[in-house]
Amino acid sequence: MKRTGQKLLRFDRKLGARFVAGADEAGRGSLAGPLVVAGVLLDYGALREHKVRPLAYLNDSKQCSEERRAELFRAVLACAEKVVVRAIPATDIDRNGLHRSNLAGLRAMLQALAPPAEACLVDGFRLGPLAPEHTAVVDGDEKSAAIAAASIVAKVTRDRLMRRLDALYPAYGFAQHVGYITPGHSAVVRERGPCAVHRLSFQALCYKVLPYQVPVFRAPEARGERLVPGTGAPE
């Protein structure tokens, strides 16, 4: 596996800031379980030589094996100046919409890190005027060390939460698919119906053959409300 960490660290250092914050999420496309957002603050005044060696394989969490993610999770906690995490439950996603929930969660992560963060980075898209001044980096979890670190924290945290939920709802196999749609997951939902941590606002085929009506929670964008550009909030 390539040692991608130095490339990602160089990207952040070129910003010319000592404190760089990155934010990312895990679980956007999942049918069940929370959306987990994370923020990581790196102090580039302290991250030198041996202190950055544990981050040698830092990369987008999707590019790492489960074992590598676990190693990087420990490395990030050891190297970061500050780490913040929030789990947004399925009920909030159903009530507020996935996109709004994601934006609000990522904004909260940057707000928790700035100050002292002098540069704030987020993966993908801008978070609107309520967030601290920030830069949206396309494919940021493959370019920025701070964003990649946040993606590792979010993914590992969410996977651990899903394993705990597996103990509460063992029939659904959350430990294996961590809430994403698989043939086995869909089959169980068709047979037993959704459990308390399923996102009922998602238009999943396995919901449509249930012998009873699944409550529909419509997000503001689905209700035809106009949203403030870049925020996901109603006008």
Image (cartoon, helix red, strand yellow):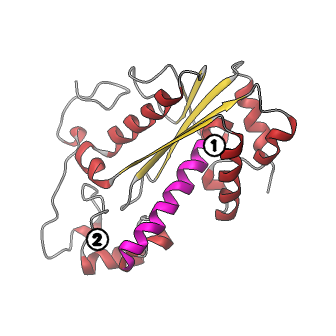
Q: Is residue 103 left or right of residue 42?
A: left
Taking 178 as reference, is 40 left or right? right
Among numbered discs 2 and 1, the one appearing first in the sequence: 1
Q: Residues within 10 Å of mark 2 (few under 14, many from 20)?
A: some
Query: Which contiguous range is marked in magenta?
Result: 149-170
Q: Secondary structure at mark 1?
A: helix
Quarter of the image where the N terminus is located: bottom right
Q: Which residue is mark 1?
A: 148
Q: Position of residue 72 (x, y in %)?
A: 69, 52
Residues at discs 2 and 1 in contact (Cβ within 8 Å): no
Q: Mark 1: which amino acid? A: Ala
From the viewer's perspective, is residue 197 above or below residue 89?
below
Please identify, in this view, whether the residue under mark 2 or under mark 1 is nearer the observer.
1
Could you tell me which secondary element the residue under label 2 belongs to?
Answer: helix
Residue lying at the far left of the rendered structure: 212
- Read off the residue under disc 2: 206
Q: Position of residue 99 (x, y in %)?
A: 35, 41
Under mark 2, the amino acid is: Cys
Q: Quadrant of the C terminus?
A: top left
Is residue 114 magenta-colored? no
Residue that appears at 23% across and 43% down: 219
Magenta-colored segment: predominant secondary structure: helix
Vertical arrangement, residue 24 with respect to residue 71, above or below: above
Q: Which of 211 and 86 lies nearest the eye of the viewer? A: 86
